[in-house]
Amino acid sequence: MRKPVKEIENVLQNHGYSINNIICEVMKTFKLKTLCRKVGFLKQDGYSSAEILSLMLMLPLMLLKSVHALYKSDFQKVTTMKKDSIYRLKNNEKMPWRALLIGISKQFQRLVNPTNEVDEKSAFILDDTTLAKTGRRIEQMTQVFDHVAGKKGSKLGFKNLTLGFFDGKSLTPIDFTLQVEKPLKKARHRKERFKKQRDPKSAGAKRIRECHVSKISNGLDMIKRAVKQGFKAKYVLVDSWFSSYEFIQTIRGLDKKSMHLVCGVRQDTRKYRYKETSLNASQLKSVLKSEGNEKRCRKRNIRYFEVLVDYEGIGQIKLYFCRFPYQKKFRLFLSTDISLSLLSMLEIYSIRWTIEVFFKEAKQHLKLGTCQSRDFDAQIAHITTCYLLYTLLAYFRRVNAYESLEGLFAEIKDELIEKNVAERLWELFDDLLQVVITSIAKSGLVDILEFRNSSEYEHLKELFVEFFS
């Protein structure tokens, strides 16, 4: 019987890489094999899903960008598994990637918060990021707008809408959807995109349908699933894009109205009731100015108005008109928790920045968004494995007191470089030794050709590599 996971573990132990501690030990702690069986993440034959998934999770830690890169590198000796086994799993529409990710996130919380306490700053954070692609033939490919790039921000790719959970110390991804936006302009390009027949009831078909649903609807569905799975948070944090009336009303109705929403708000035509008068944001700001209610926060050097209003169908909320240093316009924030002062609201809202850090780290270190497979199922698999690995690393970092993911990866990279140097030195020594062996053998003085395949030769190699490691 094959034991590829054990095989991988042994190889990594023999090489002394940190990868072994980070993945093999943490996977045991998370009971990954058991979880795969529990959520139905199974294959009918060949290598098990857990075995293949273990190898997929290790790729970024080996500083490899793809499965193809693995089989072109020295790391191919880690396993006898062929690359087609990995590709088949990634392209399998039946794999419940969402259930696996939620299961890992729940296990993370059980490990770090066994009493299931709700931290005062715990929050669901919803945001999206652009995953740019170069392959126009990728399934469901569209043009998406990247606000970071400005006016010329339209590019090929997807919007990755992610729900993160901040437990007071760490942010972990719970769920995500891939969103499409503007269709490709040319009909020929749309026709050339990869197409695949799927069972309408399969997980992959459901993901395809989701990508055409609005981000607000998908975001609400993700939060509802998280609450149903037992995640508890005091706040939901979003930017102004998500702060529609429907979104605010739905959030306040979830989990027995235990969660509050803190968000940026557009200064649009929606009405708020203030002193028996319905006013939009601009009108309300003008009234507050005329009443002389402007305040100043010396700590942040912010000029602001803070006011309680009634929002029809939702109840009493607090609005904050803020003008930050070096800005001419006021920004508007909303909190359904009316007990929050301006500073408390800003402190809570600033937690939303953790998901931006998450996106940056996942792209920089875990190769998020680099999958160029034409199959949409493979895109989902790639993002999920990035998020699974991030969660495992978040746990490793938390229990080992690493300050950042960047520091953790720096240590891994240093060890890999040291090992590669040792192996290259051995190759140089081996080449020189081969010249000596050949010369002696040709002279006929000593029959030394057998030495090349002897146990003594292997022992010499081990000592050499160990010395330089």
Image (cartoon, helix red, strand yellow):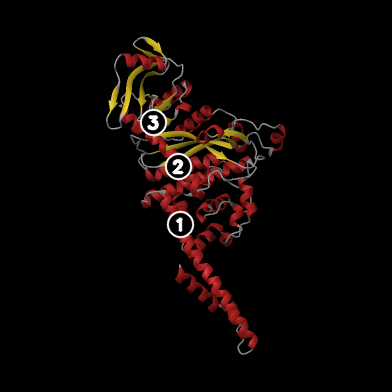
Farthest residue toward the top?
276
Taking the spot 32% from the left edge, 28% from the top edge, the residue there is 302
Q: Which part of the image, by quadrant, shows the C terminus?
A: bottom left
- Dot 3 or dot 2, earlier in sequence: 3
Taking the spot 60% from the left edge, 79% from the top edge, the residue there is 435
Residue 379 lies, in percent from the top left, at 59, 42
Which quarter of the figure has residue 133? top right
User: Element at badge 2?
Assistant: helix
Report the Cα–Cα distance between label 3 and label 2. Answer: 19 Å
Q: Which mark is nearer the camera, 3 or 1?
A: 1
In the image, which disc is placed on residue 235? 3
Most foreground residue, 330 or 373: 330
Q: Which part of the image, by quadrant, shows the N terminus?
A: bottom right
Q: Amino acid at mark 1?
A: Ile
Q: Which mark is nearer the camera, 3 or 2?
A: 2
Q: List the residue tagged with mark 1.
A: 412
Label 2 packing within 10 angstroms: few (<14), some (14-19), many (20+): some
Residue 209 lies, in percent from the top left, at 61, 31
Q: List the residue tagged with mark 2.
A: 358
Farthest residue toward the bottom?
445
